[in-house]
Image (cartoon, helix red, strand yellow):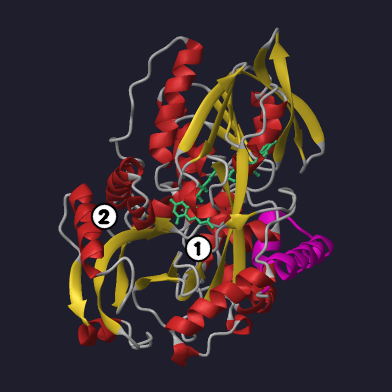
């Protein structure tokens, strides 16, 4: 997809107007690109940094209905999410995988056993599959042996699903490309272009080439997540976002050994938290608080969030010696939430998506990773209105095509059919450190997935930067020849990239 010289080809393609220009390369923009391209439209997507480098890399990685939405009475969102979860598991085996959750019940807990039983029954009904069941204390502890036993009566098991949020975004973009969409990272929309009073494209800058050029389009979609008020200001839109930060730790599995995911309620404020087995490690989070910093600074976990999470981890896993210093990494993301009623707490704000058309700029914000396809179809409807056309909703069609059964499935589901066609090399199966990323995947990403910087490779094409000690610095010597060979970097460029990655990791991902 992003093969040699793709940047200059992208700029050349922009000489002709597109039907749709999508600004923002997170899951929302990727989903819209796929649906619009499938509908036969000429589509371009631009992303100011790397693809999925915004909120879409820092989620809890769950493709889920969300029990908390059920608890807050948001039945429609829960039902829609559960149904999407079922479809995504069907369509993306190995990329969206079923995940069992344990939900302990302690004496005097609220909600209590019977309320949880009813909620989980409703959850199963929405998926049209009976899955949840109750376990007595001894059985429950058999699955979660390090859990605090004080007051533990037993607990439920229910099912949701797990993904790699970045890979999901990339895979949707790759599929969009197979339908003709073009996508460029490190290209930023600076200034909207107008014809009369109507938005007609954007003046953009490619930070890799330093070149600025115009991209004209009949419709512009603002899928910039937490940045969306910025573009809206250019069409006189009043600010509507309430950016809410959520942070997670990534612990080595041996520090927080959970074979299944577990939902817990923070002992201080009863907010739900998750410990999730993910790519050989355990992700623990999340927080939910107003993000006061500039959205242009990469968000990071604060000391107060760290203490809040560690307090819960210590409470529930007293034998595990939980400390921030034992984490491999931390990460934080900003939820692009549309501000609701005055006085609502962060957790009370709705996660529903919102779409509006202001002077031809279609802005889509809010929503969840899980429901990206529903959101994309809603946006397509708006695009249809703007173009005076009708597009059928495409939610039930398989999201990707040509997934073979057998040995290449992981590669093809994650990277697309071109992965199967790549020549084999003797060291293909050598893993990157203790991760399950192999050299074949690295080479493929370097050759086909628009890697511009070392952090793209370490944090997004792979998640090694979150999963290895010190961001995987110890693995870089082995990576140097592979990366330099694929990207044509010399020793000076390599050193600059290592310095850039190390500084970024220290500032943003080192546990605090
Ligand atoms: C802590 C946390 C946990 C979450 N957990 C889950 C979960 O488990 N499951 C779930 O379903 N959802 C979850 N979510 C929600 C989900 O992650 C978000 O809804 C989703 O990622 C938002 O995607 P987006 O594409 O709208 O925004 P983003 O991913 O932020 O994408 C917007 C992109 O626009 C780009 N951009 C901005 N301005 C410009 C410009 N001028 N030109 C070009 N590009 C620009 C940005 O760089 C950015 O990459 C979670 C969110 C958070 C914060």
Q: Residue furthest right?
A: 492
Q: How many marks?
A: 2
Q: Is residue 256 visible?
A: no
Mark 2 sits near ligand 1, with its Cβ under 8 Å away: no
Q: Residue at x 56, y 72 (%)?
A: 249
Q: Please name the predominant secondary structure of the magenta segment in the image.
A: helix
Q: Position of residue 171 (x, y in %)?
A: 46, 47
Please say if 104 is above or below 386.
below
Give the camera-side residue of 201 and 170. Answer: 201
Label 1, label 2: how many angstroms apart (C-alpha)?
A: 19 Å
Q: Which quadrant does the C terminus fall into? A: bottom right
Q: Position of residue 204 (x, y in %)?
A: 74, 30
Circle 1 SS class: helix
Q: Which residue is mark 1?
A: 440
Mark 1, residues whose alpha carbon is within 10 Å: few (<14), some, or many (≥20)? many
Looking at the image, residue 3 sits to the left or right of residue 70; the answer is right
Q: Which quadrant does the N terminus fall into? A: top right
Q: Residue at x 31, y 42 (%)?
A: 80
Circle 2 SS class: loop
Q: Position of residue 411 (x, y in %)?
A: 41, 57
Mark 1 sits near ligand 1, with its Cβ under 8 Å away: no
The stretch drawn in magenta includes residue 500? yes
Looking at the image, residue 389 sits to the left or right of residue 462; the answer is left
Looking at the image, residue 245 sits to the left or right of residue 493; the answer is left
Mark 2, residues whose alpha carbon is within 10 Å: few (<14), some, or many (≥20)? few
Q: Residue at x 21, y 84 (%)?
A: 139
Q: Which residue is mark 2?
A: 405
Q: Is residue 47 visible?
A: yes
Give the camera-side residue of 4 and 140. Answer: 140
Q: What's the magenta region?
A: 481-510
Looking at the image, residue 68 sits to the left or right of residue 285; the answer is left
Q: Position of residue 507 (x, y in %)?
A: 74, 67
């Amino acid at each position: 997809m992003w093969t040699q010289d793709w940047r200059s080809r992208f700029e050349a393609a922009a000489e002709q107007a597109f039907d749709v220009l999508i600004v923002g390369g997170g899951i929302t923009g990727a989903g819209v690109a796929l649906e619009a391209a499938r509908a036969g439209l000429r589509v371009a997507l631009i992303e100011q940094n790397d693809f999925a480098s915004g909120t879409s890399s820092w989620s809890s990685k769950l493709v889920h209905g969300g029990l908390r939405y059920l608890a807050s009475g948001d039945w429609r969102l829960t039902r829609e999410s559960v149904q999407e979860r079922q479809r995504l598991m069907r369509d993306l085996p190995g990329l969206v995988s079923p995940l069992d959750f344990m939900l302990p019940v302690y004496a005097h807990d609220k909600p209590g056993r019977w309320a949880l039983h009813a909620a989980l029954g409703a959850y199963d009904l929405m998926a049209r599959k009976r899955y949840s069941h109750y376990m007595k204390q001894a059985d429950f502890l058999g699955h979660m042996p390090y859990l605090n036993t004080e007051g533990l009566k037993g607990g439920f098991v229910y099912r949701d699903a797990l993904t790699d949020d970045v890979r999901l975004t990339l895979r949707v973009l790759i599929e969009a490309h197979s339908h003709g969409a073009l996508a460029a990272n490190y290209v930023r929309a600076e200034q909207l272009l107008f014809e009369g009073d109507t938005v007609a494209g954007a003046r953009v800058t490619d930070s890799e080439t330093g070149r600025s050029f115009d991209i004209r389009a009949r419709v512009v979609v603002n899928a910039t997540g937490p940045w969306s008020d910025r573009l809206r200001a250019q069409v006189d839109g009043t600010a509507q976002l309430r950016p809410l930060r959520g942070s997670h730790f990534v612990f080595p599995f041996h520090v927080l050994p959970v074979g299944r995911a577990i939902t817990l309620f923070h002992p201080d404020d009863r907010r739900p938290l998750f410990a999730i087995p993910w790519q050989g490690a355990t992700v623990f989070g999340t927080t939910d608080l107003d993000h006061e910093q500039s959205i242009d600074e990469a968000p990071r976990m604060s000391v107060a969030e760290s203490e809040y999470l560690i307090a819960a981890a210590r409470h529930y896993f007293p034998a595990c010696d939980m400390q921030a210093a034992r984490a491999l990494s931390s990460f934080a993301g900003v939820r692009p939430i549309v501000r609701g009623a005055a006085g609502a707490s962060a957790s009370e704000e709705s996660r529903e998506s919102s779409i509006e058309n202001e002077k031809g700029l279609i802005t889509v914000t809010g929503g969840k990773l899980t429901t990206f396809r529903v959101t994309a179809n809603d946006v397509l409807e708006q695009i249809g209105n703007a173009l005076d056309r009708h597009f059928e909703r495409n939610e039930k069609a398989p999201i990707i095509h040509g997934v073979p059964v057998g040995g290449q499935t992981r590669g093809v589901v994650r990277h697309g059919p071109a992965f199967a066609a790549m020549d084999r090399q003797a060291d293909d199966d050598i893993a990157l450190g203790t991760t399950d990323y192999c050299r074949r995947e690295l080479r493929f990403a370097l050759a086909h997935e628009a890697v511009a910087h070392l952090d793209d490779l370490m944090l997004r094409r792979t998640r090694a930067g979150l999963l290895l000690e010190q961001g995987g610095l110890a693995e870089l010597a082995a990576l140097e020849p592979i990366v330099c060979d694929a990207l044509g970097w010399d020793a000076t460029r390599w050193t600059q990239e290592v310095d850039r990655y190390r500084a970024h990791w220290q500032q943003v991902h080192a546990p605090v």
